[in-house]
Amino acid sequence: MFDDFVGYLKQEGYKDLHAFIVDSDVKRAGAVILKYLVRSLPVGVVLYDGVARPYKPDTAKWFLLGWIFRDAPVQRLRPMVPSMPGRNTTEKQAALLNQLRGYVANIFPDAGKWTWASISEVVIDRLEGSRRAIKGTLFEAIVRRHLAAIFEKHKLPLTISDNELRLEGETFDVSVLGKKEKLLIPVKTRETMGGGHALLFTRDIHKAISAAHAANYECLPVIIAESWGGDLKSLNCKDFICINMNPNQVIELEPILATELEKRLPAFRSLK
């Protein structure tokens, strides 16, 4: 994907990626970016996400340029796109990327910063973030699926919310609704627990519990982490599920998680 983009730039008259980045002709560079975004990718040129699923071509091109320019296309750039000049989304994306190109040219003027060796470090970091996010969403879906099976099996008149709930900056993707009461289930997963990561992970768990209680909801955290050093007794909630395993072990984890959820049947039955 990167080689194809560099080859495209050479077809457009640039010596290499660095020459494109530092081009002071803003209009020309903007036109080259727009042309790339509307250009079809050659057969076999594919960008994959963090778990090796192919991105759609338009998304792949947008992501690649965002990463090359040292930014985050989803978290940071996407909210800016609607405010850019242009007749459609692609033109607006091109305008934003061109502004970003000029900005990073001043920060990284050295040609060595625009080789694949440097860009690959950025891409690896972004794909690792993608992989972790996808893994987290996977377990939220697994929890929802097993809850649905438990409620059906025991004929419980409970509903699993279709929409995420946001409280004090915390997002709860799994919530169980009785007629009047609601149980929030934050799902927290972590693969490695070294150093400051353990502290941040512990802080996130406490924040989720506090946000739920501040809104007068009960909370059942589901924690999947290998060698987590957090103090379980300090969790300010009636109950929690903590499985000391790496979340990458999905096949081994799922039956354990299903059993732990089944054990909470009295809590589910108590929801009014």
Image (cartoon, rainbow, N blue to C red):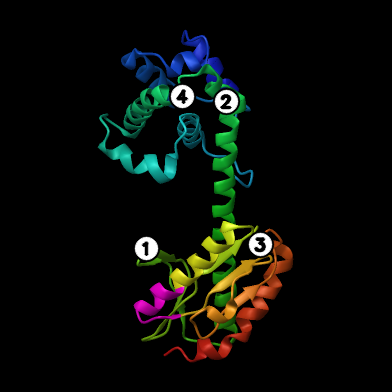
| Mark 1 → mark 4, Cα distance in angstroms | 34 Å
Where disc 4 sits, the SS reads: loop
Q: What label sits on residue 2 in the rendered view?
A: 2
Name above or below for residue 216 compared with residue 193.
Answer: below
| Mark 2 → mark 3, Cα distance in angstroms | 31 Å
Q: What label sits on residue 108 in the rendered view?
A: 4
Q: In the rendering, at what x and y percent does residue 187 appear?
A: 54, 68
Name above or below for residue 267 compared with residue 146.
Answer: below
Q: Amino acid at mark 1?
A: Gly
Closer to the chain start, of discs 2 and 3, is 2
Does residue 223 appear to the left or right of 36 in the view shown? right
Closer to the chain start, of discs 3 and 1, is 1
Residue identifier under label 1: 169
Name above or below for residue 72 compared with residue 226.
Answer: above
**Residue furthest to the right:** 252
| Mark 4 → mark 3, Cα distance in angstroms | 38 Å
Q: Is residue 25 something one can see in this rendering?
A: yes
- Characterize the local packing of mark 4: few (<14), some (14-19) or many (20 or more) Cα atoms within 10 angstroms: some
The answer to the question of whether label 4 and label 3 lie on touching residues, with beta carbons closer than 8 A, is no
